[in-house]
Amino acid sequence: MSGGPGNVPKRVYCGLLTQLIVLVTGIVLTMQMHKVGVISDQNTNTVTQVSDDWTTLPFTKIVVTDDKCALGTIPVFTRQWAGTEMGCLVNKLDWIGYGSS
């Protein structure tokens, strides 16, 4: 009996191919995880904001004023936005047949 490549069962080839795929996948994942592990190169602003939001207390009282905030209070809206065009908001439901008699 001669032992050549034609005598090797297909399951051996499949096993070798599977091991090769696992090896290459492991090497690629290791290289990618090394890049992820360097925190200083990443933008962590979103994570920091979530942490800050969790420590922020909810509004319990809002006082509307045209002057500066009173002592011991903080401004809720620090800038005003007037929109892109002058106009008024009209809550009108007529376009779908509701709201008008």
Image: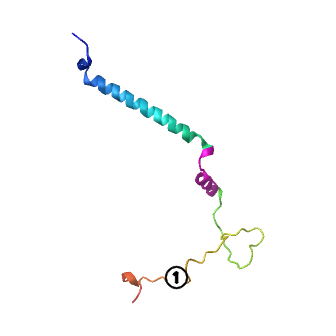
Q: Residue 99 location in percent, x, y?
A: 41, 84
Residue at the farthest left position: 1
Residue at the farthest top position: 1
In this orientation, which residue lies closer to the viewer: 90 or 87?
Answer: 87
Q: Residue 91 location in percent, x, y?
A: 48, 82
The residue carrying pointer 1 sits among few (fewer than 14), some (14 to 19) or many (20 or more) residues within 10 Å by Cα, namely few
Quarter assignment of residue 84: bottom right
Q: Quadrant of the N terminus?
A: top left
Residue at x-position 57% and y-position 39%: 37
Question: Looking at the image, is 13 positioned above or below residue 95?
Answer: above
Magenta stretch?
Answer: 40-54
Question: Looking at the image, is 59 positioned above or below residue 100?
Answer: above
Asked whether, in this view, residue 75 is left or right of residue 91, the answer is: right
In this orientation, which residue lies closer to the viewer: 6 or 92?
Answer: 6
Asked whether, in this view, residue 71 is left or right of residue 64, the answer is: right
Q: Quadrant of the C terminus?
A: bottom left
Residue at x-position 41% and y-position 88%: 100
Query: Hey, what amino acid is under mark 1?
Result: Leu
Residue at the farthest bottom position: 101
Q: Label 1, on which residue?
A: 89
Q: Residue 9 location in percent, x, y?
A: 25, 21
Secondary structure, mark 1, is loop
Q: Residue 49 location in percent, x, y?
A: 61, 56
Residue 93 inside the magenta-drawn segment: no
Our reading of the magenta stretch's main secondary structure is helix
Quarter assignment of residue 36: top right
Question: Looking at the image, is 8 positioned above or below residue 96?
Answer: above
In this orientation, which residue lies closer to the viewer: 48 or 28?
Answer: 28
Residue 43 inside the magenta-drawn segment: yes
Residue at x-position 40% and y-position 31%: 22
